[in-house]
Image: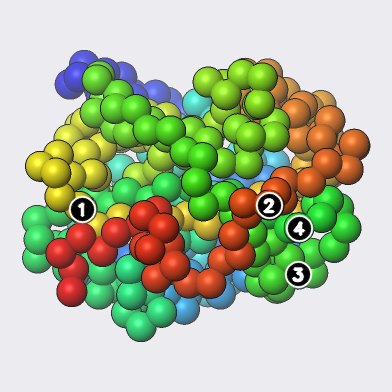
Amino acid sequence: MRVRRRYWHVRALRRGRQLEALRRRTERIGRRDILVFACCRNERVRLPYFLDYYRRLGADHFLFVDNGSDDGTAEYLAAQEDCSVWRTTASYRRAAFGVDWVNRLLRRFGHGHWCLTVDVDEFLVYPYCDSRPLRALCDWLDASAIRSFGAMLLDMYPRGPVTDQPYREGQDPFEIAPWFDARNYQFERNPLLWNLWIQGGPRSRVFFADAPEQAPALNKTPLVRWDRNYAYVSSTHALLPRGLNQTYATDGGEKASGILLHAKFLHTLAAKASEELKRGEHYADSREYAAYAEAIGADRTLWCKWSERYVNWRQLEILGLISKGNWA
């Protein structure tokens, strides 16, 4: 595992040379600042709400990699006083789908900080998030000697076809897509990396109904007290050292965990799927985006009679999707 981790560090060093600083404000990062890392492409319309959401939670500085956007994404981010931006037109696929670039920034700027690594359509929900800022969660994790915090990806969707309601810049995406699957999830422990492999939800139910084992993974470890010797190895699904992946209790109890509300299924997905199919830069030859494009073209809906409308974190706790553990 040490050899494997070294391999990912070398990858990050090499691919990190592909990054060009567009606007770097890292000298403003304070010793206790909470940092957000993200890799994006053509996400201009999503960014105002994304930044506002995490600013309200208490994030202090954002570090972005822009992968060849042509919609003003990089320029918009560069104008934000709490953002540092790097850009590259290199292959997303050859950079392990952005993992190498993010690992490079984490190693260089994340050491000693609580670092949240997310996509711009992922929104962290954790116990007491309606009354306690992200700093309170991080301080409790520190006091409990917990280095990483797990969060399952929860796909959110509208009641009708995803193209029915256009998304406006700055809008809360969950006004349009407030529904989710309360059940229909499978868990399996990975014996090699020790993480839980989670699949299911609407993507398994609708897009991969004939081959659910090929459905996207929903397990994530987005929040980590970073050390320069750590490395992500598969998006944020798994890290090394592998002890960081044990974000679940092994003694029969419960360990605090969160949810990443996933706002992928908006009307913008149609154009995104078309673009990514042409680029071919995503996992398994963009098989997932091919499934999206087919379903969108047929006006299929993700809603079913067992769908639940999102209310708050307490609802997710009742459903067993998150836990506050012993955080009182």
Q: Residue at x 31, y 19 (%)?
A: 7
Please state which of residues 4 and 49 is positioned toward the viewer in this rendering: 49
Mark-to-mark CA distance, 2 and 3: 30 Å
Mark 2, residue position: 305
- The answer to whether the residues at label 4 and label 2 have Cβ atoms under 8 Å apart is no
The amino acid on which the numbered mark 3 sits, given as a three-letter code, is Glu
Q: Residue 214: horizontal and vertical position, in percent?
A: 57, 21
Mark 1, residue position: 255
Please tell me which of labels 1 and 2 falls first in the chain: 1
Mark 3, residue position: 169
Q: Dot 4: within a 10 Å radius of its alpha carbon, few (fewer than 14), some, or many (20 or more) residues?
A: some
Mark-to-mark CA distance, 4 and 2: 10 Å
Q: Dot 2: within a 10 Å radius of its alpha carbon, few (fewer than 14), some, or many (20 or more) residues?
A: few
Please tell me which of labels 1 and 4 falls first in the chain: 4
- The answer to whether the residues at label 1 and label 2 have Cβ atoms under 8 Å apart is no
Position of residue 244 relative to residue 151, above or below, is above
The amino acid on which the numbered mark 4 sits, given as a three-letter code, is Arg
Kindly state the secondary structure of the residue where label 3 is placed: loop
Q: Dot 3: within a 10 Å radius of its alpha carbon, few (fewer than 14), some, or many (20 or more) residues?
A: few
The amino acid on which the numbered mark 1 sits, given as a three-letter code, is Lys
